[in-house]
Amino acid sequence: MIPQYASAMLISDLHLTPSMPLTAQRFFDFCEKDASQAEAVFILGDLFEYWVGDDASSQSPFQQEVKRALANLSTKTKTYYLHGNRDFLVGPAFLKKTGMTLLPDPSMVEIAGKRYLLAHGDALCTADLGYQVFRRWVRKTWVQKLFLSLPLGWRRSIANHLRSNSHAQYQHKTKSSQPQNLMKMNVTLEACAATLRSHTGDKLIHGHTHLPAHHVEQLGEQSWQRWVLSDWDLDHPEVGNPRANTLLINDQGEHFIDLVKS
Ligand code: MN
């Protein structure tokens, strides 16, 4: 049985961290107010900037605050969680404390009578072969067990190293004028088509690329719609426009809501 709701709100890529207090505050307000417009909330990954194990969160006042917000939210609104590429180590202990239900990536859900395939989006960026190799490794159970058995300090420095590496690569790819570098940072038509085909779907919702949009796409005989959620950043107006959106789906259809303005 796939989850079925009359209405839902979807968010992703908040990249919550103590150094982005305005973004975090918008999320707390979302949990308290906005989310009540829908029967269910789906968090499509990268809620956190990084996650090095559920045991680390008990030492972080910030993560405790997020945990309380999620726990409050899930008492009022059914809340689902899909792992992103930065917080795929969010584990059973944290999920239990917050009352969220983990969904595999991708997952089919039914909202207002229509079927949508939900994904974080990183697995669809198949032009980036290097990343896909990395992803296959870090998603192996034994690799994760090994990592989680390391002392917390080591885990934090590994995570910081990976983050600065991926930041440097991102800068390099976005500044580069070569189209193949920009292509690497987006999903491919082939991956979307194949994933939708294997789930017999024609509506896809994901985040990860930070390229919010609604697309109508086609490959050969197959056509589909694709909604991309924005990342959230209200703390760096000097770098880019403050941004945070949610996709609201109900009997009126699919609508992006700008959470910066509302
Ligand atoms: Mn991501």
Image: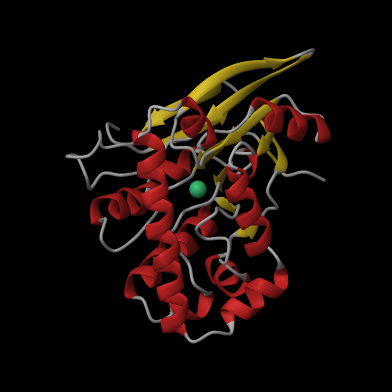
Q: Is residue 7 visible?
A: no
Compared across the picture, whether 145 is left or right of 51 comes to: right
Residue under the point 33% across and 69% down: 62
Quadrant housing residue 197: top right
Q: Position of residue 135 (x, y in %)?
A: 62, 55
* Residue 66 percent location from the top left of the image: 40, 64
Q: Is residue 86 above or below residue 231?
A: below
Task: Please tell me which residue lies in front, 117 or 254.
Answer: 117
Residue furthest to the left: 238
Residue visible at 68% across and 57% down? 136
Q: Is residue 163 shown above or below 129?
A: below
Q: Residue furthest top?
A: 221
Compared to residue 224, the image places residue 79 above or below, namely: below
What colour scheme governs how the chains and residues are painted in the rendered image of this protein?
A: secondary structure
Q: Residue at x 41, y 83 (%)?
A: 153
128 shown above or below 16: above
141 lies left or right of 257: right
Q: Quadrant of the C terminus?
A: top left
Depth check, front residue: 188 or 44? 188
Left or right, 20 with reference to 78 = left
The x, y position of residue 149, in whole percent, is 59, 84
Image position, residue 195 (x, y; %) = 75, 35
x 38%, y 81%: residue: 59
Q: Is residue 93 visible?
A: yes
